[in-house]
Amino acid sequence: MSASASEPIHPLALRLRGKAVLCVGAGKVAHRRLSALLEAGARITVIAPAAVPEIRALAESGALTWRQRGYEPGDLEGMWLAHTATGDPALDARVSQDAEERRIWCINAADAQASSAWTPAITRTSEGITIAVSAGGDPRRAAGLRNAIALAADTGLLPLRRRRTGPGSVALVGGGPGDPGLITVTGRRLLAAADVVVADRLGPRALLRELDPAVKIIEVGKAPGDHLATQDQINEVLVREARAGNRVVRLKGGDPFVLGRGGEEADYCRAHGVSVEIISGVTSAISVPAAAGIPVTHRGVATGFSMATGHDELCELPARADHTLVLLMGVGRLERNTATLLGRGLAADTPVAIIERGYSPDQRVTIGDLGTIAATATRIGVANPAVIVIGDVVRLSPHAAGILEPSQQPAAAVPHAIDARRVQHRVPQPVG
Ligand code: SAH
């Protein structure tokens, strides 16, 4: 019996729990297939004069029965399914033939074309979906396609949203600095599976447009002075939606634990009996400087960096040009903060960069020095969201060329996360 690749097949899902399955042969191929059959709960008898250690161990543990002898046609008696992988094509053909006569489906590992049945390439998603691919008897092609589908499922590109069952949950997902490519694979997958998304003003907003129309999007974005929702209200929304049985994704800008109040949201959920998981994200503190070609550390320039909110006094932070300072939410108090740093002995010509709206089409990079940057920022109307970088690493940015004294390091050596070709920058002339 042989089949052509174009012959239509009839896919079936078998419930094998407790069903007798014969496996002739006990080599590596047999072992690989046996694992899947065991997982499905089949009652397996292996027939082979010798077995690989893995199959011996399974027999010793009682997971299957191994009869240490050659195959006899009577072995097929009472079987629902047979599998032959003996390494001897003639023997495999005989087992297939005997099974055919007894109307037992038989998987012949030696010859897919001569098999009455075969195992498709399989992937199982965390949503409880099994995807099986058969490519007309070409297992490599099937496996390649299966891998591509598994990747699409993992990265949230497939509509895997399940019907609501069981209790709801909350995932605090770090969305990264705004570029839709800078969310983690796990974050992307959870987003695709969410029933409710509680969204910030910052983060990968473009991904919201790709959500299934049935997904409820709750906007809680806060702009300074324009509070859409208080933190208490956000906490309550998370718990309320999860208790209604929803899978809630709290999509946050950057990383949930970097000035994101993620800890408070997680505590509140747990205190109210709602299970919560935290998915780290790419923080703007590191990635937004990178979008302007600034590495927060660079060999020979800076060996460390400190990050702080610009809301706070900067009295405790290291004040040295070779230790990078990164300030978030620092536009409002830029003048006071630069004065503090100057007062602590940081030189007036210490380089400063302000990157507004990082990763957006209107990202703007302003380069200056500690003595003059506050005046420049006021003059050109620098606004949030912006990341402020203070220290010698700023010289490494291509945006600093012609404005600051170049550093010893050539700017071309700096790897840019997203370089100047993609985003339009207006670099203002330094004042004075
Ligand atoms: N959890 C976030 C930070 C939240 S605080 C993170 O890890 O990135 C909000 C501040 O982050 C903004 O005021 C701004 O300073 C900074 N920020 C976030 N995204 C930004 C972006 N795309 N461009 C510039 N600054 C950004």
Image: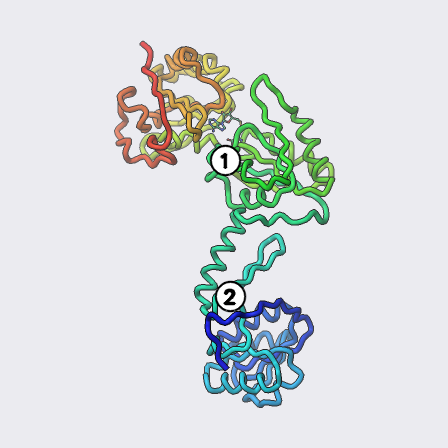
Q: Residues within 10 Å of mark 1 (few under 14, many from 20)?
A: many
Which is nearer the eye, 158 or 398? 158
The first of marks 2 and 1 along the sequence is: 2
Residue at 70% x, 47% y is: 164
Residue 52 appears in the figure: yes
What is the quadrant of residue 288 in the picture?
A: top left
Labels 2 and 1 touching (C-beta < 8 A): no
Residue beneath label 1, please?
Answer: 176
**Residue at disc 2, secondary structure:** loop
From this view, report whether residue 315 is shown above or below residue 126.
above
Residue 228, horizontal then vertical, whole percent:
63, 23
**Badge nearest the viewer, 2 or 1:** 2
Q: Position of residue 37 (x, y in %)?
A: 60, 71
Q: Is residue 155 left or right of residue 171?
A: left
- Give the side of residue 205 with respect to residue 241, left or right: left
In this view, the residue in front, 5 or 365, is 5
Tell me the residue at 42%/13% (across/down).
Answer: 374
299 relative to 99, above or below: above
Residue under pointer 2: 134
CA gap between label 2 and label 1 equals 38 Å
Q: What is the three-letter code of the residue carrying label 1?
A: Gly
Quarter of the picture holding the C terminus: top left
Say which amino acid is labelled 2. Ser
Toward the top, the furthest residue is 432
Q: Where does the image place residue 425, in percent across and percent down from the top left? A: 36, 24
Report x, y in % for residue 10: 57, 69
